[in-house]
Image: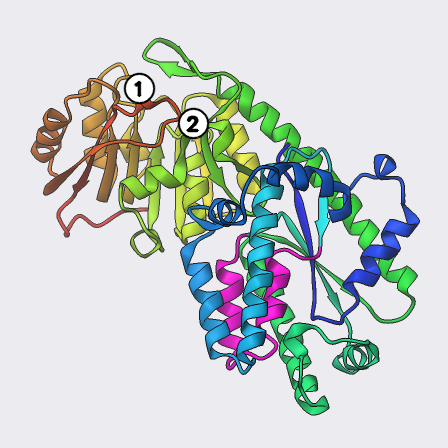
Amino acid sequence: MTAYRVELIGPSGVGKTTLVNLIRERHPDEAARGWLLPADIESDIALARAGSTAGQRLRRAVDGTIPEDFFATCFRILADSTMKPSQKFSAATILRKSCEELHEIGMLSLDRPLLHDELLLHRAFSLLPQSSDVERDAGEYFQRVPLPDAVCILRVSATEILARVLNRGTRPNCYSDLSDSALHEAILRSLRACDIARDMLTDRGVAVHEISGEGDPADWANRLLEVLDHEAERAAHRSELMARLLASSRSFRKKAGRHELRTADVAYCSFNTPAFGVPRAVAQRDAPARLARFHLTRDEVAGKHVLDLGCNAGAMLLELSGMGIHRGLGIEFDGDKVRLASEIAELSNLEVLEFRQHDIDTLNGGELGRFDLVLALAIEAHVLDADRLYRLLAEVTGGLLCFEGNGRCDIRAVGDRLLQLGFERVEYLGFCDDDVRPSNNNRPLLKAWKPSGSMPDFTH
């Protein structure tokens, strides 16, 4: 399975390293554990880096992998902070290291959850202690940072952290050269960032655990081991879901028969939710690329009611759930795909999503109502009556329709028919570009709009 990450975070000086060392001392035998630590994958990381230059590793780690708005937030926080220029350079260097390691971990196939204390969530505590506005900066950081599967927040009082930092021989970069009073203020900002992280990450669907670092360190270790046992169970569930998803993706309905996927051992479409995702490397198609090809951004879909006809295992709606949609309904013929999509949504606490089993060839649009955004992707050649499908699309679309034809689809004829059925405007977008098989990127695309007076109806 792909790496299942549990990130351990907290203010610099809180005791993360002590805690990691404690659980390693109590369970030194890697093979006997149900979880991994960073030291356990050092050889795998070294192998992933072999033969590549520092520049190549950086480009692989950040270009097209980590959202640009996240980097913009990091660099703005650095620019606005009260850290000295040398500290800002050091903080940027540490950020780069975490980006590269995160990318390399994502390429590994691990059989157990990985607990890590130096990835991008914890980098917030390299940037925020001297923030000019911690409420704003922490809010933006934790809204945009790439998500792990779970997070543990280690907390103690500001007084205790201050004593631990002062007793060290050296100070972390983010606390360097601060007076005792300024250091105390920086620690308070870090603790406030913990509160914001807890709330923001919970809202984004991440499993958040809090551990007190006060008292007997053995108690910290016991609590963390309980968390790791819990996350190991979730990781096993995710692995089982992935196996079922791969099996379910082998075929789907085509007219009165079945279409067999020509690419073996892949999911039909990649997507990502906080608790479960399908990486692009193991998918035939790619949900983020499909949305981008239709120019669907967060600003355009936030707050919208979305319908996906022929949703397969729900990848498009699962991806859209991270863009702030108000409600998503997926319609799919295969019951096993509906059950999978529903389980994945439940795993990520995505109550805004619903999946139903229906035959599009017999579906009555009045059963669904009208939606702000309707997706009809690569289904026109698979239904028994394409014109009935177009009439259904006209009935359920209250705003925007995103339509992808199958190969050999006459997209201009489809656009003309939609205009006859009451759509106001059609825009042709060329062809898809997200299929792992280049020969399959022959599916034509269009967007069609209903008149502005066609208000969606969600009474059904």
Q: Residue furthest top?
A: 257
**Residue 159 on image: x %, y %:** 78, 83
Q: Nearer the viewer, residue 388 or 19?
A: 19
**Residue 119 on image: x %, y %:** 63, 55
Above/below status of 13 relative to 320: below
Please report the residue visible at 52 percent of the width from the left and 58 percent of the height from the top.
Answer: 145
- Which segment did they paint magenta? 117-146
User: Please, what is the dominant secondary structure of the magenta stretch?
Assistant: helix
Q: Which residue is mark 1?
A: 439
The N terminus: image quadrant: top right
Which amino acid type is marked by label 2? Asn
- Under circle 1, the secondary element is helix
Residue 156 lies in the magenta stretch: no
Q: Nearer the viewer, mark 1 or mark 2?
A: 1
Please report the residue visible at 61 percent of the width from the left and 72 percent of the height from the top.
Answer: 193
Please report the residue visible at 54 percent of the width from the left and 49 percent of the height from the top.
Answer: 54
Which amino acid type is marked by label 1? Ser
Determine if residue 112 is in view. Answer: yes
Q: Which residue is mark 2?
A: 312
Answer left or right for 28 relative to 445: right
- Give the colouring mode of the picture: rainbow
**Residue 457 on image: x %, y %:** 28, 47
